[in-house]
Image: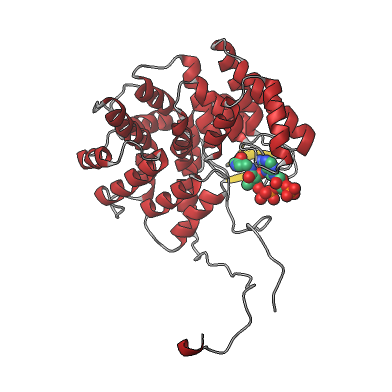
């Protein structure tokens, strides 16, 4: 018997996890019990990654050792550099990272001497190096050095992009953004990672799958689309008129809405405040005013709120980051959450294999070729 259509696994609990709560009644977000507000205010991305991967906050000694370890892991093998040089200059940057991850999976295979935690840390350290090596090779012909003396990942990334150390404020902004993006329960890319891990596949295959899922504009790709939208307008009034028109045509406004949160994304006020401060610092508040008006209109007309991607776009813009790099930056943070989930899936594994709700044709008698 045919059943009603179902969609998107909305509202379905698909497994147990100790890593993150998002949504719930108060629309909160916690990593291993710590609120996103506390993490954004007090933690470094490295502390957050340690917490997600190892289950508890590091002591001072553990954090120093962890930061050193990540710092040592930033370079990439020559064979990977050679492949990155062959990836076309006009490649999508998410494809560059997916390829980089896949190649590293061949060069540094998962084994008894290279375990999941080691690979997680290696990818946290090296995704930015992989992307920026490819980027500079193809934009300026330079084979850049991937060894910076920067202590933290946020500074390393900004240094590789701009060729110099960031200001303390810019480092803090990217650091907070990486924390906000680090983990988010059973979202599409994390669930993809867990599904691949559940087949007992290798670490890199699962992460390649996660990158593929994150690339889509309904997921991580929304931050780039949000930037393209904001940049289209010259004034808040122009933005308001265009958004009203788009809503009338039932078009999606990227960076708004969420599958789990219903009234607010707790990450959004944090990232919005950074976007405001950065635009004031740059004395260029026009884009912020436009984004602010879009937020106002979306709430007034549809009771839809900005998700983390909307104001992240403006933060990255003011940090001088090219728009095509926005979703790859999401990867550089989310690799922490993906890896934590992959390891959790493995500790109590059960193959993820749901059922479909069949809505196709009734059983039919076989039709020989001559009678069709
Ligand atoms: N712009 C305009 N309308 C939107 C919208 C948006 N960004 N997000 C949801 N809606 C509308 C839908 O059109 C639908 O309207 P209808 O009831 O009149 O048909 C209603 O809100 C419910 O949306 P639905 O698509 O069922 O919600 P969902 O839970 O499946 O989708 C998202 C969640 C995130 C996929 C969706 O909000 C979206 O596409 N947002 C834009 C992409 C984005 O920012 N992604 C990043 C998420 S962190």
Which color scheme is applied?
Answer: secondary structure
Is residue 22 something one can see in this rendering?
A: no
Task: Please tell me in which quarter of the rendered image ligand 1 is found.
Answer: top right
Give the x, y percent position of residue 40: 57, 28
Residue occupying the far right of the picture: 300
Give the number of marks: 0
Report which quarter residue 360 is drawn in.
Answer: bottom right
Q: Is residue 251 above or below residue 206?
A: above
Residue 86 versus residue 179 in the image, above or below: below
Residue at 46 percent of width and 52 percent of height: 342
Residue 316: in sight, yes or no?
yes
In the image, 207: left or right of 188?
left
| Residue in the picture at 42% in, 41% down | 94
Q: In screen coordinates, is 145 left or right of 218?
A: left
**Residue drawn at (63%, 58%), measured in percent from left and top?**
9
Q: Which of the two residues, 195 or 259, is positioned nearer the viewer here?
A: 259
Quadrant of residue 238 within the rendered picture: top right
The image shows residue 12, relative to residue 368, as above or below, that is: above
Q: Position of residue 214 (x, y in %)?
A: 50, 45
Is 146 or 152 nearer to us in this picture? 146
In which quadrant is the N terminus drawn?
bottom right
Q: Is residue 142 above or below residue 363?
A: above
Q: Nearer the viewer, residue 255 or 100?
A: 255
- Residue at x 23% of width, y 28% of height: 143
Q: Is residue 56 left or right of residue 151?
A: right
The percent position of residue 111, horizontal first and vertical second, equals 29, 54
Residue 98 position, x and y percent, is 38, 46
């Amino acid at each position: 018997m045919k059943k009603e259509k179902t969609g998107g696994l909305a509202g379905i609990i698909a497994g147990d996890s100790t890593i993150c709560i998002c949504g719930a009644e108060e629309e909160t977000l916690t990593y291993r019990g710590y609120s996103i507000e506390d993490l954004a205010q007090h933690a470094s991305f490295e502390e957050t990654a340690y917490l997600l991967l190892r289950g508890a906050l590091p002591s001072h000694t553990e954090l120093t050792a962890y930061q050193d370890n990540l710092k040592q892991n930033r370079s990439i093998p020559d064979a990977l550099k050679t492949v990155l040089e062959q990836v076309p200059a006009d490649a999508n940057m998410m494809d560059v990272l997916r390829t980089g991850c896949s190649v590293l999976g061949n060069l540094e295979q998962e084994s008894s001497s290279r375990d999941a935690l080691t690979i997680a840390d290696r990818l946290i350290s090296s995704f930015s190096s992989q992307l920026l090596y490819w980027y500079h090779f193809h934009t300026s012909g330079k084979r850049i050095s991937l060894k910076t003396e920067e202590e933290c990942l946020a500074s390393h990334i900004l240094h590789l992009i701009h060729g110099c150390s960031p200001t303390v404020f810019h480092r803090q902004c990217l650091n907070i953004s990486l924390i906000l993006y680090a983990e988010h329960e059973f979202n599409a890319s994390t669930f993809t990672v867990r599904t691949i891990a559940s087949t007992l596949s290798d670490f890199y295959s699962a992460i390649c799958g996660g990158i593929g899922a994150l690339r889509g504009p309904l997921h991580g790709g929304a931050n780039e689309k949000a930037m393209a939208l904001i940049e289209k307008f010259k004034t808040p009034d122009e933005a308001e008129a265009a958004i009203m028109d788009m809503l009338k045509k039932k078009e999606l406004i990227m960076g708004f809405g969420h599958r789990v949160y219903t009234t607010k994304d707790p990450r959004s006020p944090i990232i919005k405040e950074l976007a405001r401060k950065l635009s004031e610092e740059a004395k260029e508040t026009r884009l912020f005013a436009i984004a602010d008006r879009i937020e106002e209109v979306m709430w007034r007309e549809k009771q839809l709120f900005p998700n983390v991607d909307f104001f992240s776009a403006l933060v990255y813009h003011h940090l001088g980051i090219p728009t095509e790099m926005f979703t790859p930056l999401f990867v550089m943070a989310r690799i922490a959450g993906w890896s934590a989930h992959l390891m959790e899936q493995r500790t109590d594994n059960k193959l993820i294999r749901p059922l479909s709700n069949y809505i196709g044709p009734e059983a039919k008698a076989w039709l020989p070729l001559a009678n069709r």
